[in-house]
Image (cartoon, rainbow, N blue to C red):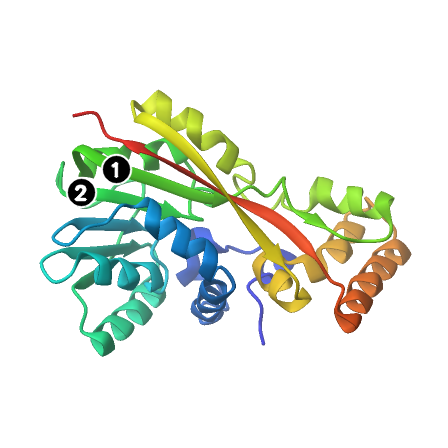
Amino acid sequence: MTSIFDQFEQRETGFDDVDKTSISGAFPEYLERMATDLAAVKRSMHGLLQARPGQRILDVGCGTGVDVLAIAELVSPDGWAVGMDNSQVMVDAARGQAAERGLPAEFTVGDAHELAFPDDTFDTARTERVLQHVADPSRVIAELLRVTKPGGRVLAADLDHGMWAPDATDRETTRAVLARWFDYIANPWIARQVPGLFRSAGVEDVQVTVLPVIMTDLEAADAMTGLGRAAKLIAAEGSITAEQAQAWDDDLRSRQADGSFFMCGAMLVTHGRVPA
């Protein structure tokens, strides 16, 4: 299967503009898999929304609409869930799923920096694993607040890519990999920065919920983070040798084979209230 991380080897566009990539069809499949691997994390995040029947809730960067459809079930029958993504490929996939399930949900293509909704439209606005990719996280957060009603809730969740901890034998190589692993992402540390950005934007009652992300399968970890090719990419840049990279990869694959592969990380969910 083609991986989205092929994009990073080629230094092409990735999640910032899915439709312009040469492998745009691989992205929906990737997000569907991540929804499964992060199922427990997503259930916790949906609880933090405090969604109720009759509410209107926006998901910015909705991907294939997995979360929007789950939210639609929480706000039905009188509420509405709206998903926005910058990718027509993603929105088409989401609309197909919504049509099959008959839920109160709609999807639109747009720009997170300039949401095409009037002020005070939604009871809650959320975004997940989006701010790491955008050009201006502060602008996106300001837009979340603008379209949310006074007293409504805003939520931004992201993986902190400085907190991944794979279990590997060679500490020196592991440290080198971790130091450069996520340099290809626009904002790899955005998760830890969002609480300050929320407060600067005027969000009240800001809280941070840390959700553990546990990976015990190398294939799943590679799909989410590119772990399986990280060492070779970094070796190509000269930070480690090709021999070190190969040995590190072999170690991970050996752990996968004997069932001892382990990597942990964290999803930071920042949530708060729009001033009344």
Instruction: Tell me where residue 80 sits by quadrant.
Output: bottom left
Q: Is residue 276 above or below residue 34?
A: above
Instruction: Tell me where residue 201 sits by quadrant.
Output: top left
Task: Examine the rendering and report whether any part of residue 107 can be seen.
Answer: no
> How far across and how far down the image is residue 8, in percent?
61, 56
The answer for how far apart the CA atoms under marks 1 and 2 are is: 7 Å
Label 2 sits on residue: 123
Label 1 sits on residue: 153
Dot 1 amino acid type = Arg
**Element type at mark 2:** strand
Q: Is residue 57 above or below residue 3?
A: above
> How far across and how far down the image is residue 190, in percent?
50, 36
> How far across and how far down the image is residue 225, in percent?
61, 56
Q: Is residue 193 above or below residue 243?
A: above
Task: Examine the rendering and report whether any part of residue 86 can be seen.
Answer: yes
For the residues bearing labels 1 and 2, Cβ distance under 8 angstroms: yes
> How far across and how far down the image is residue 242, in percent?
86, 56
Dot 2 amino acid type = Asp
Residue in the image at 19% along x and 46% along y: 116
The one nearer the camera, 231 or 194, is: 194
Q: Is residue 156 above or below residue 234?
A: above
Residue in the image at 32% along x and 26% along y: 205
